[in-house]
Image (spheres, rainbow, N blue to C red):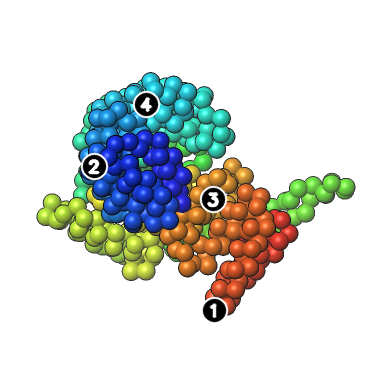
Amino acid sequence: MRGIVTAAVLSLLTSFAFGDGDELFRRAATAFQSEPETAYPLFLEAAEAGNVSGMVGAGRCLEIGIGTKQDFARAIEWYEKAVGQNNLKACEALARIYASCPNPEFHDGEKAVKYGEVLVRKNPRDPQSFALLAAAQARHLEFDQAVRYIGKAASLESRPDESALLEVRRAAYREGEPFPPVATESWMLAAVDKQLHWAIDRMLWKLSEQTHPDYNPDLAIQVCRGLVEEGDRDKYYLLGNLYLNMGRLDEAMDCFNLFNDSRMQGKTKEKHRDMDHYRMIESEDLERMLQIAEKIEKGFTESFTQSGDPDPFYGSRETYTVSRQNPANLKGAYFIYRIAAQKGSQVAREKVDEIEYNRAAYRRIIDNEKKLSNKAVARALEVEAKKFMQGMELPEDGELALGIFLEAYLLDPLPDYAAFIGELSVRNKGVKEAIRWWEIAAEGKILTAYTSLLRYYACAEDDGLLNPEKAMRYARAYVDAAPESAEAQSYLACAYARDGKFPRATQIMEDVLKQSEDTSLDIKERYEKQYRFFKSRKPWVWEE
């Protein structure tokens, strides 16, 4: 993490040193790059002596947890003192915390907008200032303004990768989704009152998820029907699931058919959702239904034939077989078991009882939420999420595990939870959503977040995900966090190679190979392959 922030922190600090704490600040700035634990007390001492740069330095260390324990409240105190002396970097930091802090308890849309507006007045050509004001407006529930300002940021941004990220944010703001996508309960209620889609979807998830303490299918149906009447045809799908859970198969099938008809007419956002297994509601073949449910519950591998590109000389296509692993899908299997049970299958009835009993175990934990602290509830949720995530004590259900981890993060925004959310989001939400969460986790120095980010930024097969600049920053941060790790060094080599610096990448891998004599055979083989690639001036592409 140290490598990510070093250059930025030094640049924002070294311009402002004055007063009695000058010498303390200079010593802190010099020590920061190599010894942040030494730098923080010096920043603090300079700040207490009235040095505005020392105030900013102490605030930044506290904000990101470098050289000291992360403490947003104390960071805000120092930033506010620096703002009192007209420091623009402190103003930027306050806008950032009030708009985008990973802990929603520190969000304050009104203050975020106030500081964000100062930034754009002072920096009218800076895209990041406008992006920050957009985040502030979103946190203030002014999403029209958020879309406007993020559009301005995109028009000013010259870097393609950053422009792409701003466009992703703009799409989120149009749906009423803040950045990062966490919020307090009071914010969520206010957003629902303003009919913002993201908040409504989050509320509907709570009302419709059987394991959630706020589960209320009747209210969920009422809300969904109101949204359908207003033109949101996607909600037919959720309505169908709600009716299916309640055993109302005829109404469920009506909703699924309406959803599918709307999808075919291009009136839904969900273009590719698979509806085939819901057709079983009309089927009478119970044996076939049970076979498919068991297959979906356990996960399965399917093979299909695919043609390659035409031969450049003869025009013929090479045909080859591709295998694809479909992960376990407990929720999909549960729906089919419910249908079969309604049609009289005792085997299916027993499976439904088993699944509902396991989910009730999670429900019993969160029923005690009011008696426990947020941290205690979050820990309990973490334990249950891992059971569904790993499929050990309970059947694997990645979608449910993701929902539980999101609830845990809202209660206690630990970077570990962000890392798990990222891992689960790859399958359930997509790579870009996963990357957003891994970057939050990387702020907390979670090593698995570094490796996940670097697999995409430095080693992705998809050029749209490669980002040499970010790859280098995260690789250096990884090495700083785990200086003895051969794996961290190998990712640093990948980052150098992606940046075109192959001699440096080759040199690093030579050192890695010397350190990895006792490493497992498969990892050592990967290191040797990477070394050969870099020596041949080729970047490494991660092999799944």
What is the number of the mark on residue 119?
A: 4
3 or 1: tag closer to the N-terminus: 3
Label 2 close to label 1 by CB (< 8 Å) = no
The local crowd at label 2, few if under 14, some if 14 to 19, many if 20 or more residues have their Cα within 10 Å, is some
3 or 2: tag closer to the N-terminus: 2
Label 3 close to label 1 by CB (< 8 Å) = no
Q: Residue at x 57, y 78 (%)?
A: 517
Task: Classify mark 1: helix, strand or loop.
Answer: loop
Reading the image, the residue beneath label 1 is 518
Quarter where residue 347 is shown: bottom left
Q: Is residue 207 left or right of residue 426?
A: left
Reading the image, the residue beneath label 3 is 472
Q: Residue at x 47, y 64 (%)?
A: 483
| Distance Cα–Cα, label 1 vs label 4 | 53 Å
Q: Where does the image place residue 275, in percent across and percent down from the top left?
A: 47, 45
**Residue 41 visible in the shown view:** yes
| Distance Cα–Cα, label 3 vs label 1 | 27 Å
Reading the image, the residue beneath label 2 is 49
**Which of 129/42 is in front?**
42
Task: Classify mark 2: helix, strand or loop.
Answer: loop
Task: Classify mark 3: helix, strand or loop.
Answer: helix
Q: Residue at x 36, y 49 (%)?
A: 27
Q: Is residue 435 left or right of residue 144?
A: right
Position of residue 320 relative to residue 251, above or below, is below
